[in-house]
Image (cartoon, rainbow, N blue to C red):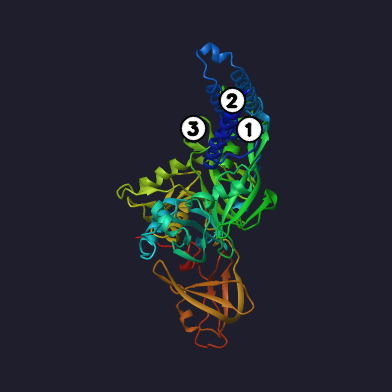
Amino acid sequence: MKKGKNSFKWKIILIVLAIIIAGIYYYMALPAINIHNQGFWVFIIGFAVLVTILLAAREKPHDVFELKESRIVKIGAGIVGVLLIIFIIGMLLSSPIINANKYKNLLVPEDGDFTQDIKEISFDQIPLLDRDSAAILGERKMGSMVDMVSQFEVSSLYSQINYNGVPVRVTPLVYASPIKWLTNQAQGIPAYMMIDMATQDTQLVKLDQPIKYSQAEYFNRNIYRHLRFRYPTYMFDQLSFEIDDNGTPYWICPVKKFNIGLFGGQTIGRVVLCNAQTGETVDYAIEDCPQWVDRAYPADLLLELYNYHGQLINGFINSILGQKGCLKTTDGYNYIAKDDDVWVYTGVTSVNSDQSNVGFILMNQRTMETKYYSISGAEEFSAMRSAEGQVQNLKYSAAFPLLLNIANEPTYFMALKDDAGLVKKYAMVNVQKYQNVAIGDTVGECQENYIELLKESGIASDSNSNLPVMTASGTISRMAQTVIDGSSHFYLVLEGMEQIFDVSVTDFVEIVKYTVGDSITLNYREGTPVCTVTGIGVNASNPQAETQPITPQNETEPVPSESISSPTT
């Protein structure tokens, strides 16, 4: 009787030991308690195996045959076997092999109109830097902060977002080492880095209240552990670091949703916003995600979903054998700011991986909205090599391009960097005729060279000269001078009018006689972001001004110097 009680006691001790071991594993690995999580099944199966081994070892079998006949081993093996069978069947029923049509329809792109959907934008909205260049600027800025550089480093995240209409990359600081964490964790992380992708302005934003929850923390303030204990059943995808419209840092935590079987057809069903300073969380359904959030859908997931659609368009067998009509995304991608959201851009090519694209797609990272543009042309890496060929003597390398609308032509725009990763020049390559390459030291110069090249090639005409000449008269309410590529320009705003009028001093030197409060009559052609002045009329309050006949203006539309970013030197 005593032996039976001791045996029962030991079984309880071994089970408690197994639970402790499992608890340590759970605290470290943080698997979601969710039947759709493969890691959870591995955890349960592993726990069943561990308990079986510990209990069987307590019986001290003399040989393998006696171990096989053990009642504990039989029960444990049966449980493990059942779990394995459910796991394997779940994997099979979730696979594209028998669910090709469901996978194909997870993401269905709409056909888009390039010239309507992708408007010409001013240069202050174009992200001129890629992630690697942003990281160089971030490290350089951090190196100048003598009060922090010995204790903190810059995280490698560099999330690209729209902040108050400006494309920026933001990333938190992290502790420089475990020892630095030990000495600083009570105060937390005091700042984050923000880099304007258009102007290259780099700021270390110091916070009144430090970041207490991040990937750099250990124990319960680690962001993954913090989320797991609050949402034990949620399966989180890639977390991103963002700031809201007030500059408050947040972790954007998308929650996986499985639509096919146990493990297949992943999309995003919810998104949790975690305040990085306080740890407070708010749980939203994906359709209710706030407008300021830019990265609810990870870019890799969106590319995977489109590849399912493109490759399974005619069924699973065709995707392996005939591959008729099968498409896939190209190997790289970039981001475009559009409609106050961040869209993932990538080209679409055939699965045979030729050197051309059949079109390209834009995918909204907040809503999953996807648009397909059927524009055939050069694949991005071919365009990059074409641009590099124009400066091969300088050995510059091209960043992965952006897709822009320049003179209603789909155009690859890319930065050209030296060996140190610094931007030295810019290139524009026509998507459909990638031998047409323009290079410039500034974005404005590059655009001028590109449009001139399009005209010489017969691809584009002087669209500005075809616009009707209009007349505006009024009193000058604002006036500013700038220099564009060595030429002086005046920008005028008339009272009661929203347009900004660009007057070239080279063409209309008499503009220097005018000032705020003078009356003026302008002949101009409509443009974005400014109207191009083609003639100056009689000034009622300034008799010395002469009437200027309407004359042809420069070939390209000038842009204020504030929106042109010079290369980093």
**Residues under numbered marks 1 and 3 in contact, where contact means CB atoms less than 8 Å apart:** no
Q: Position of residue 312 (x, y in %)?
A: 62, 30
Label 3 sits on what residue type?
Ser
Q: Kindly indicate the quadrant of the structure image that contains residue 14.
A: top right
Q: Position of residue 23 (x, y in %)?
A: 56, 39
Residue, far left: 393
Q: Distance of mark 1 from mark 3, alpha carbons?
A: 29 Å
Give the mark toward the camera: 1 or 3. Answer: 1
| Mark nearer the viewer, 2 or 3 | 2
Q: Label 2, label 3: how many angstroms apart (C-alpha)?
A: 66 Å
Say whether disc 1 or disc 2 marks the residue closer to the N-terminus. 2
Q: Is residue 410 visible?
A: no
Residue 60: x percent and y percent?
52, 19
Which numbered disc covers residue 405? Answer: none
Residue in the picture at 32% in, 48% down: 395
Position above or below: 328 against 333: above
Q: Which residue is mark 3?
A: 353
Q: Is residue 512 above or below residue 32?
A: below
**Residue 7, numbered circle:** 2
Which numbered tag is attached to residue 263? Answer: 1
The first of marks 2 and 3 along the sequence is: 2
